[in-house]
Amino acid sequence: MVDILILGHGPAGVSAALYGLRAGLEVQLVGKDVGALAKAHKIENYFGLEKPLTGAELAEVGKKQAIALGAQIVDDEVTDLMFDGFGFVATGLNGTYRGKVCVMATGAARKKTPLPGMAEMEGHGVSYCAVCDAFFYRKKNVAVLGSGEYALHEATELLSVVNSVTLLTNGAELTAAFPESVKIETRKITGLKGAGQFEGVKFDDGLDANFDGMFVAMGSANATDLALKAGAAFDDGKLVLDKDFQTTVPGLFAAGDCTGGTLQVAVAVGEGAIAGLAAIKYLREHRE
């Protein structure tokens, strides 16, 4: 278990890591990529650049800086995050990572168009965490909304508990190999069935299907998904954070685009610094 586990190795994550490393702490960064920054063709509005850099170049400079100070950087897609009583446990496609405190710096959440009625049924048959809620669907028939590795992870978690799992791709192409025990349904969804309690989905051909529950796992797990799994609170759809960018879960911080602020490298670096310093302070105050 490292001292500070950082999810994401973009500007916010690396900034938080630099402060932790300079404080003599063991820091590990785990992330799939550097997100939107990699698509930036030329960056000219960032302090200290003698000449413009591409987003990918700037990200690489930051990662090399962290590695030079002793950071562990792992390329992996994290699908789950939980607190096990001793620290935070992040589960990735390739491994499990543990930290005494955790900083989420996974970038902005991908825009997910909610299905009609989905928001009203969250917690009433619609879930975002298979590990958390599979128990409530023992021997029942459930659906997973998604088409990639994240959806595969959720479906795999459910298979040993529920009666059946149906993957709802909502018209998207499959980007992962699902086991034969998972039924694949590719029709587009027009809405959900149920009055206050999820009962199934409606398809664009006028037909429908009944399910006892649905687990949402579109795209990759982002900070919102991971924060929900860890038990952090939200207000009007936004992650609740204090002045130190700590969530309502003690020791769990967030920084960068995932906080919903101004989507700029300078802001991400600043938030990462604040979260990194707060994580150091938290660790020092909670040493046994």
Image (cartoon, rainbow, N blue to C red):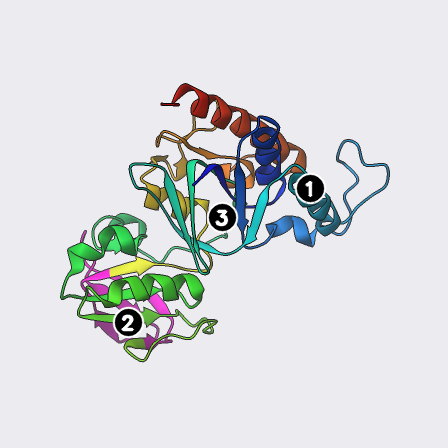
Q: Does residue 254 appear anywhere in the picture?
A: yes
How many C-alpha atoms fall within 10 Å of the one at disc 1: few (<14), some, or many (≥20)? Answer: some
**Residue 187: % across, % down:** 37, 75
Q: Nearer the viewer, residue 76 or 205?
A: 76
Q: Amino acid at mark 1?
A: Gly
**Distance of label 1 from label 2 (alpha carbons):** 42 Å
**Residue 118: % across, % down:** 31, 54
The dot on residue 109 is 3
Q: Which residue is mark 2?
A: 166
Quarter holding the C terminus?
Answer: top left
Q: Residue furthest right?
A: 51
- Precedes in sequence: disc 3 or disc 2: 3
Q: Of helix, strand and loop, which one carries label 2?
A: strand
Q: Amino acid at mark 2?
A: Thr
Q: Does residue 263 appear anywhere in the picture?
A: no
Q: Is residue 174 above or below residue 128?
A: below
Q: Which residue is mark 1?
A: 62
Magenta stretch, residue numbers: 184-213
**Distance of label 1 from label 3 (alpha carbons):** 22 Å
Badge 1 vs badge 2, beta-carbon distance below 8 Å: no
Q: Amino acid at mark 3?
A: Ala
Magenta stretch encompasses residue 227: no
Quarter holding the N terminus?
Answer: top left
Q: Of helix, strand and loop, which one carries label 3?
A: loop
- Precedes in sequence: disc 1 or disc 3: 1
**Residue 129: % across, % down:** 31, 52
Q: Residue at x 29, y 77 (%)?
A: 183
- Precedes in sequence: disc 1 or disc 2: 1
How many C-alpha atoms fall within 10 Å of the one at disc 2: few (<14), some, or many (≥20)? Answer: some
Q: Nearer the viewer, mark 1 or mark 2?
A: 1
